[in-house]
Image: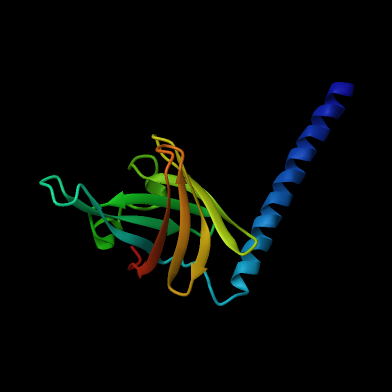
Amino acid sequence: MRFIRKSAWKVLGTLWMGLMICGGLAASQAAAEDSDLLLRFEGVYQSGPHIVAPNTRAEQTYWHYLRFYEDQTVLTVSSVGSPENFARWFRKENYPKIYFSLGGYYFEEGQIKFSSTSREGVVDYEGTILKDGLRLKTFSHITGRSSQREYHFISLPSR
């Protein structure tokens, strides 16, 4: 009988923590939505161009993209293509069939924060929402490097 009680309390505690976390996410998103600076969901945020091996035969230009969903999901990918080229596959329903990074975002003290996980490892992001974009600091647990990037928003047609 004692085991059942402990198990029941453990389940109730887990449910309570889940409700508190979800309530915190909803409250933090509501606080962010009270401002004029809203996170947008009908397209992607793009930073770049970034150049690998400049002034060599191997030179390649790529962009970094973020896609947010209202359920606190965020996708990240680097691509040489334009948003229109990859819009049909860069969707959370395609994960893990198609390779991109996945994470969850939240708001804390006026900042957006998230970590994105791929097969290689984790990259942390935090920063501010701007009128038409984002300013984010990143830290890669893969390479040990930090950076700062500005992203601008690009609307994409719905399916």
Along the viewing direction, whichever of 26 and 143 lies nearer the viewer: 143
Q: Residue at x 38, y 62 (%)?
A: 44
Whether residue 50 is situated above or below residue 117 in the rendered picture: below
Along the viewing direction, whichever of 52 and 16 lies nearer the viewer: 52
Whether residue 87 is situated above or below residue 57 in the rendered picture: below
Percent of width and height locating residue 119: 39, 34
Q: Quadrant of residue 140?
A: top left
Considering every residue shown, the one lying at the far bottom of the view is 36
Along the viewing direction, whichever of 5 and 131 lies nearer the viewer: 131
Q: Residue at x 40, y 56 (%)?
A: 66
Position of residue 5 in the picture relative to residue 43 (left or right): right
Percent of width and height locating residue 86: 27, 55
Percent of width and height locating residue 107: 60, 59
Number of residue marks? 0
Position of residue 104 in the picture relative to residue 95 (left or right): right
Kindly tell me whether residue 4 is visible in this rendering: yes
Percent of width and height locating residue 94: 37, 46
Along the viewing direction, whichever of 16 and 144 lies nearer the viewer: 144
Kindly tell me whether residue 1 is visible in this rendering: no
Whether residue 57 is situated above or below residue 69 in the rendered picture: above
Position of residue 59 in the picture relative to residue 120 (left or right): left
Considering every residue shown, the one lying at the far left of the view is 57
Considering every residue shown, the one lying at the far right of the view is 2
Position of residue 147 in the picture relative to residue 157 (left or right): right
Q: Residue at x 52, y 60 (%)?
A: 127
The C terminus lies in which quarter of the figure? bottom left
